[in-house]
Amino acid sequence: MRIAVYGATGFTGGLAVAELGRRGISPVLVGRDAERLHKAAVDAGVADAEVRVAGLDDPAALADAFAGCDAVVNAAGPFELWGEPVVRAAIAAGCHYVDTAGEQGYIQRILDTFGPDAERAGVTVVPAMADDGGPGDLIAGLVARELPGVADVLVVDARLPGAASRGTARSMAAVFAAGPLEYVGGRWRPATGDAPAITVPGEDDEVALTPFALPGVVTVPRHVRAGRVRSGIRTEVAQLFGSLTPDVVDSVPEVLDEEARRSTRWLMLVEAADDTGRRTRGWVTGPDAYGLTAVIAVEGVYRLVTGGAPAGARTPAQAFDALDFLDALAPHGVTWEVS
Ligand SMILES: NC(=O)c1ccc[n+]([C@@H]2O[C@H](COP(=O)([O-])OP(=O)(O)OC[C@H]3O[C@@H](n4cnc5c(N)ncnc54)[C@H](OP(=O)(O)O)[C@@H]3O)[C@@H](O)[C@H]2O)c1
């Protein structure tokens, strides 16, 4: 199996290359600078891995760079700026595709527009395979399974403020500026109103939320028949994202060291209610937000290549068996519950 990683010189892309190497899968590092790609291969412990150079402004060269690979992991963000040429080239090269995007508008566009091309090429395109969009969509599917007639879904990224990479800061500043969508009565529209306070596993006090553009709002309605889907994050985290001026973004470290990575913990929580007020909730949590993002993306791409998800543009829960996928993350410290 050969997997191309676009954005392999970045923090998340480098972790994805290392995860492929750890699994004995041949990575092909693709990006715009040969020297930096070779260094990334050495840093990821796969010094002999193949390196191919292709920029985003040359679609033919990009598709050539993916030729002969089974799939592409795209970790070059912000995806609003750089994502689409990589999706297009992956499909043109006959490769399955996953990315680590958390950007709601981009994920919506990929799911809306690339399905027919992916189907014709016989490949599966799954955006949002990071620590929020992947587990969040999978746990939402399991919650909905427990609540037939689900009407209202709230998707929450309940992580505490913590260390983040410059790439994330840059992407989240743009997401904050774009504002969140909500799904109501069969359509997406700009979110209105507040998000309700919630209780979070392991915490006594209620947590205040602010509506925020999470992937779940654009992925969950594609497989859960709910009248309303909203999303939010802790108000204190939303305030941090709101303060991300270009100068602040430039001051964020590009890479988190081991200690900073270990200090991070992510927690996706989904609350659902039916019209009678019956409620179900589920949560999924794990350590090392960036390391787990690499594991989630690589696990996804491995399953696309070996498992035969239907061709097309799919959400994580449409592409993968949720129980099986979450169980595969357990050895990495991921736990989850639906109650
Ligand atoms: N949702 C989540 O939970 C989650 C978790 C992890 C990561 N992510 C997302 O993953 C993305 C990457 O994050 P990161 O911290 O790894 O960022 P990063 O370290 O800044 O890496 C960005 C990568 O994109 C490439 N790139 C940037 N501009 C490019 C261009 N014009 N042409 C070609 N390549 C270009 C860079 O290549 P060069 O070396 O050539 O500049 C680099 O390889 C971000 O969007 C982040 O939000 C999301």
Image: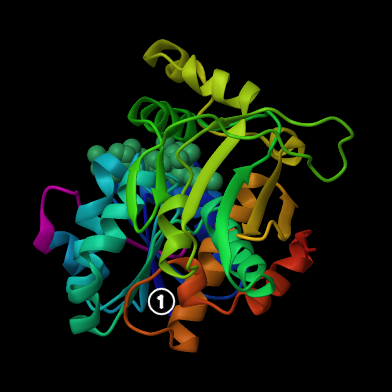
Q: Nearer the viewer, residue 280 or 245?
A: 280
Q: Let me know if residue 148 is in the magenta part.
A: no
| Residue 9 visible somewhere in the drawing | no
Q: Quadrant of the N terminus?
A: bottom left
- In the image, residue 2 sits, relative to residue 35, either above or below, namely below
- The majority secondary structure of the magenta stretch comes to loop
Q: Residues within 10 Å of mark 1 (few under 14, many from 20)?
A: some
Q: Position of residue 32 (x, y in %)?
A: 25, 46
Q: Position of residue 22 (x, y in %)?
A: 62, 67
Quarter assignment of residue 256: top right
Range of residues picked out in magenta = 45-60
Q: Nearer the viewer, residue 277 or 217?
A: 277
Q: Position of residue 3 (x, y in %)?
A: 41, 71
Rendered residue at 26%/85% (across/down):
122
Which amino acid, mark 1? Arg
Question: What residue would you read off at disc 1?
Answer: 2
Determine the quadrant in which ligand 1 lies.
Answer: top left
Q: Quadrant of the C terminus?
A: bottom right
